[in-house]
Amino acid sequence: MTDSPSTAAAPAPRSPWPLALLVAAAMGLLHMGVGLVLTRSSRGDLVSIEQTWTPAELAGAEAPGGQPEGTGIEIAAWTRAQRLWNDAERHAERRAQVRALQIALWASFALQAGFVGWLALRAGQRRAR
């Protein structure tokens, strides 16, 4: 004896939230990986600069001005000040690049996760009808 389609038990509707959470977690991992790959050289540059100079030196770096006419100690001090100034500028640029990319990736993730959440909410409402 076969059951007719009208008497067969319909499967209980599944909640869309486990799948939505899985998709959001996968997107989060993907965004994190993309961020690490895209900022790798900038982060390496930051580490290199931070190993060369102390935070106080980087924070207090000032433009060295024109090259002195003297020789010896004045030139050595000016060269060091010039390297410090260049490294401090590069450090600030790299930090700004990493921060800007991180903000963009967080915004992208939030937008995509919000869309997935909206789809899950709509799917849940549709199944409830």
Image: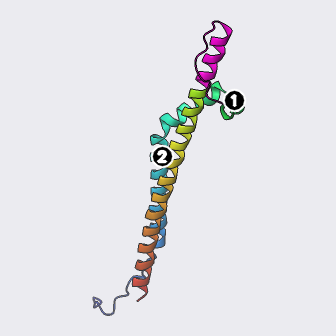
**Residue with the most extreme bottom position:** 6
What SS does tag 1 mark?
helix
Whether residue 73 sits left or right of residue 12 in the image: it is right
Picture disc at residue 35: 2
Tag 1 residue: 57
Q: Residue at x 44, y 74 (%)?
A: 118
Q: Residue at x 60, y 24 (%)?
A: 65
With respect to residue 72, does 65 lie above or below? below
Q: Where residue 27 sits: x, y (%)?
A: 45, 57
The first of marks 1 and 2 along the sequence is 2
**Residue with the most extreme right position:** 56
Q: Amino acid at mark 2?
A: Gly
Q: Amino acid at mark 1?
A: Glu
Q: CA distance from mark 1 to mark 2?
A: 29 Å
Quadrant of the rendered image containing residue 66 = top right
For the magenta stretch, what is the residue range?
A: 61-84
Whether residue 48 sits left or right of residue 38 in the image: it is right
Q: Residues within 10 Å of mark 1 (few under 14, many from 20)?
A: some
Q: Nearer the viewer, residue 75 or 6?
A: 75
What SS does tag 2 mark?
helix
Q: Residue at x 27, y 88 (%)?
A: 2
Q: Where residue 58 sits: x, y (%)?
A: 66, 32
Q: Residues within 10 Å of mark 2 (few under 14, many from 20)?
A: some
Q: Nearer the viewer, residue 44 or 10?
A: 44
Q: Residue at x 48, y 34 (%)?
A: 41
The reply to whether the magenta stretch includes residue 78 is yes
